[in-house]
Image (cartoon, rainbow, N blue to C red):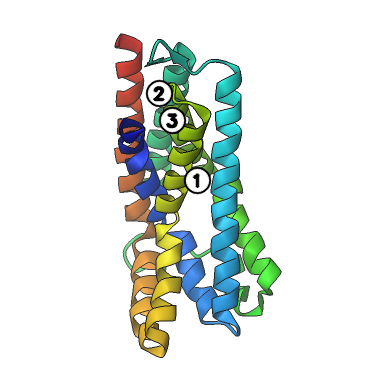
Amino acid sequence: MGQALGTVLPLAVGIAIFPVPIVAVVLVLRSEKGRVKALAFVLAWCVGLAAVGGGMLLVADGVDASESGEPATWVSALLLALGLLLLAAAVKQWRRRPRAGEAAHVPGWMDTVDQFTVARAGAIGFALSALNPKNVLLSVAAAAEIAAFGLDPSQQIATLAVFVALASAGVVAPLLLSLALGERSRGLLDALRDWMAANNAVIMVVLFLLIGAKLIGDAVTGFTG
């Protein structure tokens, strides 16, 4: 189980530092009843990650993801495909990055965050984790990696739970800061929001390149192991 956790840790970190959901939580916290809405966002986010990962584990369990303790060929092929998709996404993100003097692109729905209900905040949290292609890709990859170790079901669930917790650190941190520091957290969170929004493209490119290379490396190891 420890080896499985070590394998999926980079994927969890990759999800945790995606800028858009972190910026979204900070904006939600600035709205009326912000902490309640942020809590709904975070809980729904966790449910979304768990749903995608759990679904992949069920699929992998039905088609034997592990062969004598080694990843099945289909798992290695899946990791290779996901790694190549991430490299392609890095190139696309780089080409779409803001040029000098251009404002960073922000999703249109962020302009209406102050009008969110608790339910709407939860729906956005779920969508960003369970429906966002980038997060789905990494969650599927993590679940496939976990399944490939041939762990028993309880160990798979425990490993997935730790993965979800680590991958949620980015959206949980602003809420914890707000609860711990109150109004004193406002300046810190605003600075975090502005920095992540301005550097979103660069952060995403670096993440996609590093994680894509990792998945390709894991695939090659699986093919040759």
The label shown at residue 149 is 2
Q: Nearer the viewer, residue 167 or 206?
A: 167
Q: Is residue 158 above or below residue 147?
A: below
Rendered position, 82 above or below 62: below
Kind of residue at badge 1: Asn
Helix, strand or loop status at disc 3: helix
> Residue 177, position in %: x, y?
38, 76
The image quadrant of residue 173 is bottom left
Tags 1 and 2 in contact by the CB under 8 Å rule?
no
| Disc 2 from disc 3: Cα separation | 6 Å
Q: Which residue is mark 3?
A: 146
- Decide which of tag 1 and tag 2 comes sooner along the chain: 1
Cα distance between the residues tagged 1 and 2? 22 Å
Q: Residue at x 45, y 56 (%)?
A: 168
Lower sequence index among marks 1 and 3: 1
The residue depicted at 60 percent of the width and 73 percent of the height is: 37
- Percent x, y for residue 162? 42, 46
Q: Is residue 10 visible?
A: yes
The percent coordinates of residue 204 (x first, y second) are 37, 50
Question: Dividing the image into 4 quarters, which one contains the C terminus?
Answer: top left
Amino acid type, callout 2: Phe
**Picture quarter containing residue 191?**
bottom left
From the image, tell me which residue sits under label 1. Answer: 135
Nearest-to-viewer mark from 1 and 2: 2
Circles 2 and 3: CB atoms closer than 8 Å: yes
Q: At label 3, which amino acid type do we have? A: Ile
The residue depicted at 42 percent of the width and 25 percent of the height is 79
Characterize the local packing of mark 1: few (<14), some (14-19) or many (20 or more) Cα atoms within 10 angstroms.
many
Residue 78's spot in the image, x, y percent?
47, 23
